[in-house]
Structure formats: structure tokens, C-alpha cells
Amino acid sequence: MNDVVLVLAHAADTGAASVAASLHSMLREDCACASVEVWTVRPAMLSQAMWSHHVDDHGRAETQLTLPGRPALLSSQVRAVFNRIQHLPMPSFLHGSAQDRDYAAAEFHALMQSWLASLGDRVLHSLRNQPLLSPQLPMLRWAQAAVQCGLPVAPRDAGVPALEWDATVLVAGTQTTGVLAGRFGRPCVAASQALGFSVLEFRFVRRNQVFALVGVSPYPALTDLEDIDAVAACICDLVHSQAADELERDGVA
């Protein structure tokens, strides 16, 4: 079976669907990666899949995943994962007791974390840099990184909801998009790297002709074509880097 890129996203996530379509086109045009498939996987499908997940005495995980209607997939066949999961539905336990649902949810959440962590830097966002299945960025954390990288941060209390934003800068690897990318692109990339994320959306508000940062999200909306293609290109670069690493390990490079 061909190698696979997984896009883990909810049905309502149209941005992720657009990224998957763009990525599919990019890979088809690349002779070296033309055989790589792109699978969009709903979180509910993951809970209905057949799993074989084993961690050896050295902490190395081996996983075989069989999704409904799909052939079995080994971890070694996964080139990249674009993780947009924000919650894990468990449809098989809808009619179970609250205790059974909570137990199943906790066990499955731990399985998902272990699987994605074992894939290392093949995952956007890598669990090596942040251990949560659905990454969160508290205000105090992103604000500190932003200030250290020279970004203007709008003053507000941590408990106060974020202001509506007027413009964004999307970071995808080292590429930036958005109307403010020319002004704030470099410090946004630096802040993303400091925070340990490859894809982040920086949200700016304009007050008295001055822009200031009011939010940073690991879940960009991905409604703009330029943003969609930038994220797809970032995943494509990840696919290439994994192929190069494999060649080097095999002594071909």
C-alpha cells in the first residue's frame, strides 16, 4: 500500500478539507511523492477503528490502524499528520453509562496521545513540543513569546475575552501570509518557533492607526486561499523531509 498523509478533522472543518484538496494537488504534481495518498479522517472514525498499539521496553511504539472502509495502516506508512482535532467523540458509547463513557474516553484519549506522540515531528502539531492532543495556547504564554520576539501586544487581563481582530498573519513553517505579513512576518515566525508550533494564526487589532496583537491560535480558520496553500505546502515539505530521512537511514542519500 502507498504511504499516506492523514488529515484529522471534524466534518465542519472546511478549512482542513481545503488543505487536503490543495495538498493532494501538490503531491500529484511532484514526481517523488505522486504515490502518496491523502486521507481525511473524522475523529469519530478513529474511535470506530481497529487498533493494535504496542510500546516496547525502550519506549518505541508500533501501531497498526484499520479505519472503516480502509486498508490497514502501519505507523511506518504515515508520512505526515495534520491534526485539527478539538474533541474526541465516542459514538459507540452514546448509550453506555456515564462511568463507561468516561472510562472509554480516557482510555481512547491516552491511546491517541501515545500514537501521535510516537509519530514525532511527522505531526502538525508535534506532541513533542506540547503534550496535548488538542493544543491550547494560554494568553500569558503566547504574549511572553510575542513580546520577546518584538511583536506589539495589546494590553488586557488574562481573564478577559480576546478582542475581535482586524487582520491576521498566518505562519506555516517559515512562510507567512496575510496583509500584515510584510510588517510582522519575521517576528511571528520567531514567536511560532519559540512556542514550538509550525502553524499558528496571529490576530491583530487596529486602534488609532496602530496594530497590536490580541490573540494567537493553533487553529487558523483557513478560509483564505493563500493561507490554505501555505499550510498545504508546509505539510508537503514535511512529506519531503520524511522521505529524505528514510533515504539517509537506508544509506541511499
Image (cartoon, grey):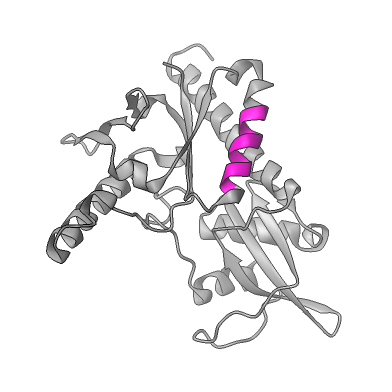
Q: Residue at x 33, y 42 (%)?
A: 46
Q: In this rendering, would 69 be left or right of 106?
A: right
Q: Is residue 21 inside the magenta stretch?
A: yes
User: Which of these two is toward me, 101 or 37?
Assistant: 101
x, y (%) of residue 72? 32, 24
Q: In this rendering, would 244 be left or right of 223?
A: left
Direction right: furthest residue: 209
x, y (%) of residue 116? 36, 43
User: Which of these two is toward me, 218 or 7?
Assistant: 7
Above or below 136: residue 90: above
* Secondary structure, magenta segment, majority class: helix
Direction front: furthest residue: 95
Q: In this rendering, would 97 be left or right of 4?
A: left
Q: Residue at x 58, y 43 (%)?
A: 17
Q: Quadrant of the N terminus?
A: top left
Q: Is residue 12 inside the magenta stretch?
A: no
Q: In this rendering, would 57 be left or right of 64?
A: left
Say whether residue 146 is visible: yes
Q: Which residues are magenta?
A: 16-25
User: Which of these two is toward me, 58 or 201?
Assistant: 201
Say whether residue 150 is visible: no
Direction top: furthest residue: 252
User: Which of these two is toward me, 5 or 130?
Assistant: 5
Q: Residue at x 72, y 64 (%)?
A: 168
x, y (%) of residue 32? 61, 17
Above or below 221: residue 142: below
